Image: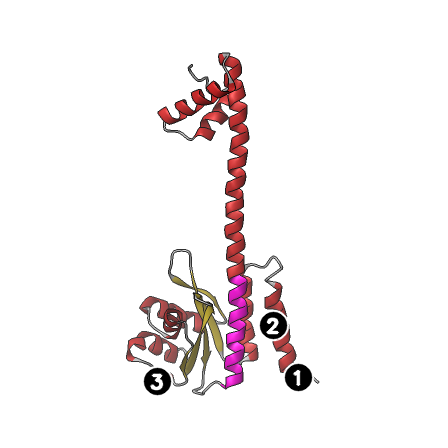
Amino acid sequence: MISEADSALLRTFATLADSLVDDFQVLDILQTLVEACTDLLDVSAAGILLLGTDGHLDLAASTNEANRAVELMQLSAQAGPCIESFRTGRMVAVPDLTVAPAAWSAFRDSALQQGFAATYAVPMRLRQTTIGALNLMNTSSATMDEHHLLTARALADVATIAILQERTIREHDTLARRLQTALDSRVVIEQAKGVIAHTHGTSIEDAFTILRDFARANRRPLSDIADAVVRRQLNLPR
């Protein structure tokens, strides 16, 4: 018979997997991940630093204000387990924060002040692409067991796949919108050619030359000039 813990883990994986086909928001995925970590991995808090479009890490999700304060300090100092995990693409384990590296002093002091004693950072990585790091924090100094570490990595991997897919879809949608805009503009240009050919008594080929030359001479987009012609807001000279 499946245990309650295993059942909860399967439900979490199902929720994250749904984001691969459902209309999930990225923040919903990340919040689900950090909350699942505190429920399933015997940790006191969890947070995620995610790479933004500006190329910098930012706090994307956290389970409580204490964790949020520590993550923000880590970002401010640009030193800590998540920063290290993101840069190296490897898991970082610090079961006793009192012996954390000296370079992490700002993060270490903030974490200890907030009552944390241990931290583990898991890279959110797919092959050569790292998009952030998951930070797991405990109020007691202890080594996380191998089963929980493997579970944390698996949860982070599923969330990473979901986020990268969302970004791919968004980029595809942006490209599709640009292509559609180009197609729509082409229709307007064809209409403008007809208007010019009619008003100037010229061929369609010559009408396009008039349209193109006017746009170039005035350093304006061809589609904008075509739209103005169709709307009868602009009468081009021969």
Query: Which residue shows up at 38% across the image and 68% down it?
Result: 72
What predominant SS class does the magenta segment belong to? helix
Mark toward the start of the polypeptide (2 vs 1): 1
Residue 154: say if magenta: yes
Q: Disc 1 on helix, strand or loop?
A: loop
Mark toward the start of the polypeptide (2 vs 3): 2
Where is residue 106? Give x, y as percent: 31, 74
What residue is pinned by disc 3? Answer: 98
What residue is pinned by disc 1? Answer: 3
Viewport quadrant of the C terminus: top left
For this view, does 151 lie left or right of residue 83? right
Up-down relation of residue 186 to residue 179 (above or below)? above
Residue 119: say if magenta: no
Q: How crowded is mark 3: few (under 14 residues within 10 Å), some or many (20 or more)?
A: some
Q: Residues within 10 Å of mark 2 (few under 14, many from 20)?
A: some
**The furthest residue to the right:** 1
Where is residue 186? Give x, y as percent: 52, 31
Q: Which of marks 2 and 3 is in front?
A: 2
Query: Which residue shows up at 50% across the image and 75% down it?
Result: 153
Q: Quadrant of residue 128?
A: bottom left
For this view, does 155 lie left or right of residue 133? right
Q: What whole-number distance in Å separates the C-alpha atoms at marks 3 and 1?
A: 36 Å
Q: Nearer the viewer, residue 127 or 220?
A: 127
Q: What whole-number distance in Å separates the C-alpha atoms at marks 2 and 3?
A: 33 Å
What residue is pinned by disc 2? Answer: 12
Q: Nearer the viewer, residue 36 or 152?
A: 152
Q: What whole-number distance in Å separates the C-alpha atoms at marks 2 and 1?
A: 14 Å
**Magenta span of residues:** 145-163
